[in-house]
Image (cartoon, grey):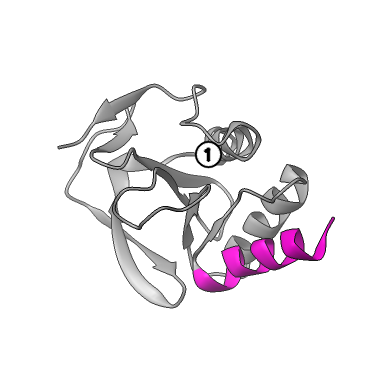
């Protein structure tokens, strides 16, 4: 793994997101995400490739619970937000943390960890919205 790749992965864990263009070892990235989430509390990150600007760059939002059982996904295409079609809002909130900042995710948006990690692995490989998940537009 190159030092740039190592730095991108460390930024991902420490800063809540990273440009994954240079990540060539998706297994290491997944292991780092799992380890960071297990250290608690529930963690979330934003993955993007070849950033243009925060508003315009497509990105995958990822969350993992510290108990390793579930997480969440979102997709931003540069204009619209998408969530997995299999999820729905409940009005009950779960706390997550991103680079030390608190955020809440609707409990109904959570998915099994394997579903989340499969989508992350696909994104790390293709740099495109994961097709392993059916998406619905949120706005």
Q: Residue at x 55, y 55 (%)?
A: 19
Q: Is residue 123 magenta?
A: no
Q: Residue at x 41, y 53 (%)?
A: 52
In the picture as drawn, the residue positioned furthest to the front comes out as 52
| Residue 111 position in % (x across, y down) | 44, 38
Q: Horizontal placement of 84 versus 27: left or right?
A: left
Q: Is residue 72 above or below residue 34?
A: above
Q: Is residue 54 above or below residue 26?
A: below
Residue 115 in sight in this render: yes
Q: Is residue 14 magenta?
A: yes
Residue picked out by circle 1: 116
Q: Is the stretch drawn in magenta largely helix, strand or loop? A: helix
In the picture as drawn, the residue positioned furthest to the bottom comes out as 100
Q: Is residue 78 above or below residue 22?
A: above
Q: Residue at x 20, y 36 (%)?
A: 138
| Residue 95 position in % (x across, y down) | 35, 64
Q: Residue at x 54, y 34 (%)?
A: 119
Q: Horizontal placement of 61 versus 9: left or right?
A: left
Residue nearest the viewer, comparing 71 with 24: 24
| Residue 114 position in % (x across, y down) | 59, 35
Secondary structure beneath label 1: helix
Q: Horizontal placement of 79 versus 4: left or right?
A: left
Residue 85 in sight in this render: no
Q: Horizontal placement of 123 versus 59: left or right?
A: right
Count all numbered tags in the image, as a single digit. 1
Q: Which residues are magenta?
A: 1-15
In the picture as drawn, the residue positioned furthest to the right comes out as 1
Residue nearest the viewer, comparing 113 with 19: 19
Image quadrant holding the N terminus, namely bottom right
Image quadrant holding the C terminus, namely top left
| Residue 55 position in % (x across, y down) | 29, 53
């Amino acid at each position: 793994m190159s030092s740039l790749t190592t730095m991108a992965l460390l930024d991902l864990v420490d800063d809540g997101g990273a440009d994954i263009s240079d990540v060539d070892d998706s297994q290491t990235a997944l292991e780092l995400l799992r380890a960071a989430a297990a250290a608690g509390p529930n963690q979330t990150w934003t993955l993007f490739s070849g950033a243009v600007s925060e508003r315009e760059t497509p990105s995958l939002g990822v969350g993992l619970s510290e108990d390793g059982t579930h997480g969440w996904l979102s997709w931003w295409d540069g204009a619209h937000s998408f969530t997995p079609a299999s999820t729905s809002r409940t009005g009950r909130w779960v706390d997550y943390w991103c680079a030390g900042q608190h955020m809440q995710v609707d409990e109904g948006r959570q998915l099994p960890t394997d579903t989340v990690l499969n989508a992350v692995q696909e994104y790390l490989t293709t740099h495109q919205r994961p097709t392993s998940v059916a998406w619905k537009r949120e706005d």
